[in-house]
Amino acid sequence: MNPTRAEIDFTKLAFNVEQIKHHIHRGQQKKKIKICGVVKANAYGHGIDQVSKKLVDLGVDFLGVANYDEAIRLRKLIPNTQILVFGTLVHSKLEPEKYVSILHEHKLTATVASFDTAKFLNEYSTKFRNKFKIHIKVDTGMRRIGLDYKRAYRNILQVAALKNLEIEGIFTHFAASELKNKSFSKLQLSRFNDLLNELRKAGLEFPIVHAANSGAVLDLKDSYFNMVRPGLLLYGYYPGNGIRNKIKLKPIMNLKSKVTYIKKVDKGESISYGRKFFTKKPVFIGSVPIGYGDGYSRLLTNKSKTLINKKFYRQVGSVTMDWIMVELGSSHKVKIGDDVLLMGEENRFKLGADKIAGICGMIPYEPLCAVADRVERIYLNG
Ligand SMILES: Cc1ncc(COP(=O)(O)O)c(C=O)c1O
């Protein structure tokens, strides 16, 4: 009913996945590199359920989520694809046996970023026929979570000795792969490779090795190993400006609403809260029911544009919780009920999350993740 909605086009998602597949296999036709589609944070605001199902249809091998709540929700919909939980196990209100049995039941793959987590999972997995699948996270420079690369060797050997765990994978995460200058990413990569070599000498090899997030997928081929973990690229955006030309992408979300009210305002009147905009002449003002309560940031106040009938109109006055106002000029052809594009692309008209983020001093991830629950997601070409 509410005219504000996010239209998500699965043809464009399929296009982006194809672009990624083609790019990572360029020059290495014989080697199959798996894709872990990152769908955490409600698939970057696009809707975790529908996007994940589609990604599985499109041949993605793993789904990556931030925490166990996201993973359990996803498993109810997606019976077979492996779900890797990037986050750590946090204390639960449940008894440990119950907690670990839920993780087993849902066939989740855990990240192990400390020996304590490994011990915990091992201890409470004794009664299960299948070993608990884990991927070991190595901190090579992100300094968020992970076994410190300098000390990881001993810890990993200890983890490998635990009877109820299966170390299926090992991975690291880049801190600055979105930059054109890849020197820190290369340093992280060499730390990771050194560790893998040491472990290999000790007889430890891992079926799945992964490191590349979107920035590295674009232009750090040596980091692909046998799985990559793109997030932002799937949704049609580049993580950094210096590395845009590597593949073509299509933003998959168009955030839209409708003009629902039009009025004429005299010269010198103020528009919206705080009186941050005054009309310079008599103009028509259109009101559009989207605001910061929908994820349209208040930082856009007086700074953004909207697209109506293939023409840009500027947004004027403070963004409010539920409305923005747009200046339609002293004469116009806009009608109540006309569509308004707030974020996304239509033909050659670009109003992407990267542009919105640029105005707000954000990164493109933020305006996408910010799209609120109350905004209906509509899936096109499903
Ligand atoms: C562990 C991990 N891998 C991969 C990604 C995907 O990152 P991006 O969206 O930059 O591709 C993320 C997201 O931050 C992450 O936390």
Image (cartoon, rainbow, N blue to C red):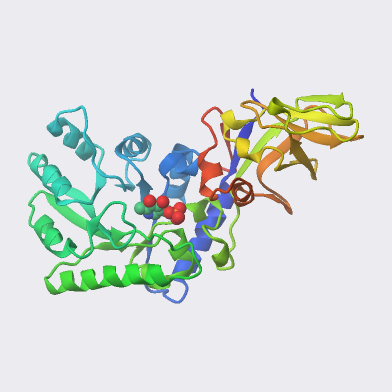
x, y percent for residue 283: 88, 32
- Compared across the picture, whether 52 is left or right of 348 comes to left
Residue 105 vs 184, above or below: the answer is above
Pick out the residue farthest to the bottom.
27
The answer to whether one can see residue 301 in this image is yes
Q: Quadrant of residue 311?
A: top right
Q: Nearer the viewer, residue 364 or 378?
A: 364
x, y percent for residue 232: 49, 53
Q: Nearer the viewer, residue 144 or 338?
A: 144
x, y percent for residue 262: 82, 25
Residue at the spot 54% in from the left edge and 58% down from the top edge:
238
Residue at the spot 49% in from the left edge and 68% down from the top edge:
23
x, y percent for residue 268: 86, 29
Residue 269 vs 242, above or below: the answer is above
- Compared across the picture, whether 342 is left or right of 98 comes to right
- Quadrant containing the C terminus is top right
Q: Nearer the viewer, residue 373 or 281?
A: 281
